[in-house]
């Protein structure tokens, strides 16, 4: 899949960041929303004239000078509940999404979190099933490492090797990367670009904001209509032109 990233200047698109979709009763890192809450969020987006789509679809539309009615939907880590919790809701709303997975931990769990419940990650078959059902698969690195603390060898493995592993798994090119923990520096951006990714997702906006450090808005279980609306509006007020995006 090739994702054209335009070189013109334009505002940063609105991209929501989710993780797990399921039971959020024991959720110390606040990474889980219930399927009912996701359903409510997508209903609100539709009310505001926005449809949630994968980053590949969003960026391709922007490159054509379109896509003002699109919002990006991303799901980090590749939790197994994506297939059962998120995908039915996405399909009901006619939405697509990007799922950022860890090819070094398929079938494992969130062992990088020091505390809290272990959440199972999708197996290789699960990732293939998501892709077959129209979900864009991107890389979240091999094993969930903070790239700003990785040595040169680890940096290459987490970026280039994870892309190669996913391409092998899926039989397609992999366009997107997502920085674990959202931590990003110039060296990490260069490694991601050199590995051949067309775009990458960060979290906070900053001096590196651009096609390889796209800011995203954390959306959680506590985001009711009013809070989500505020996040959407604040983003639009703060938005500014960024080279490489329309
Ligand atoms: Zn993560």
Image (cartoon, rainbow, N blue to C red):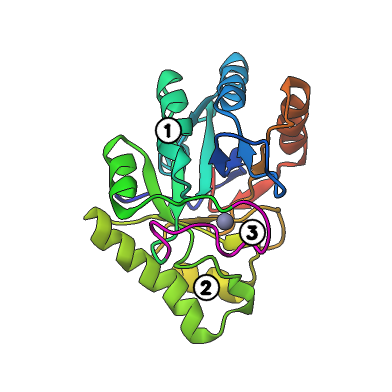
Span of residues in magenta: 105-117
The residue sitting at the bottom extreme is: 152
- Give the side of residue 140 with respect to residue 173, left or right: right
Question: Mark 1 = which residue?
Answer: 84
Q: CA distance from mark 1 to mark 3?
A: 26 Å
For marks 2 and 3, the one nearer the N-term is 3
- Give the side of residue 27 with respect to residue 158, left or right: right
Q: Position of residue 82 (x, y in %)?
A: 45, 39
Label 3's element? helix
Label 2's element? helix
Q: Main secondary structure of the magenta part?
A: loop
Query: Total number of numbered labels?
Result: 3
Residue 190's label in the rendered image is 2
User: For the point 55% across and 42% down, which residue is it?
Assistant: 20
- Give the side of residue 147 with respect to residue 133, left or right: right
User: For the point 63% across and 74% down, which residue is it?
Assistant: 148
**Residue 190 visible in rendering:** yes
**Residue 14 visible in rendering:** no
User: For the point 31% across and 66% down, which residue is it?
Assistant: 165
User: Image quarter for residue 31?
Assistant: top right
Q: Position of residue 213 (x, y in %)?
A: 59, 58
Characterize the local packing of mark 2: few (<14), some (14-19) or many (20 or more) Cα atoms within 10 angstroms: few
Q: Is residue 197 magenta?
A: no
Label 1's element? helix
Q: CB of mark 2 within 8 Å of CB of mark 1?
A: no
Characterize the local packing of mark 3: few (<14), some (14-19) or many (20 or more) Cα atoms within 10 angstroms: some
Question: Mark 3 = which residue?
Answer: 182
């Amino acid at each position: 899949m090739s994702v054209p990233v335009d070189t013109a200047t334009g505002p940063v698109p609105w991209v929501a960041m989710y993780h797990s979709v399921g039971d959020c009763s024991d959720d110390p890192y606040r990474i889980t929303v219930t399927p009912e809450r996701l359903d409510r969020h997508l209903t609100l987006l539709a009310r505001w004239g926005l449809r949630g789509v994968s980053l590949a679809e969003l960026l391709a539309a922007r490159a054509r000078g379109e896509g003002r009615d699109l919002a990006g939907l991303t799901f980090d880590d590749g939790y197994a509940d994506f297939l059962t919790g998120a995908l039915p809701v996405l399909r009901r709303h006619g939405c697509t999404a990007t799922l950022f997975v860890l090819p070094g931990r398929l079938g494992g769990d969130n062992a990088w979190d020091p505390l809290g419940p272990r959440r199972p990650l999708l197996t290789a078959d699960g990732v293939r099933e998501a892709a077959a059902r129209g979900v864009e698969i991107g890389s979240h690195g091999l094993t969930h490492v903070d790239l700003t603390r990785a040595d040169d060898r680890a940096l290459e493995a987490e970026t280039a090797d994870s892309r190669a592993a996913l391409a092998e798994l899926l039989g397609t090119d992999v366009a997107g990367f997502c920085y674990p923990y959202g931590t990003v520096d110039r060296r990490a951006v260069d490694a991601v670009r050199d590995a051949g990714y067309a775009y990458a997702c960060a979290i906070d906006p900053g001096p590196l904001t651009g096609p390889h450090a796209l800011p995203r808005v954390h959306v959680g279980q506590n985001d009711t209509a009013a809070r989500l609306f505020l996040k959407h509006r604040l983003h639009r007020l703060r938005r500014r032109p960024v080279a490489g995006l329309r």
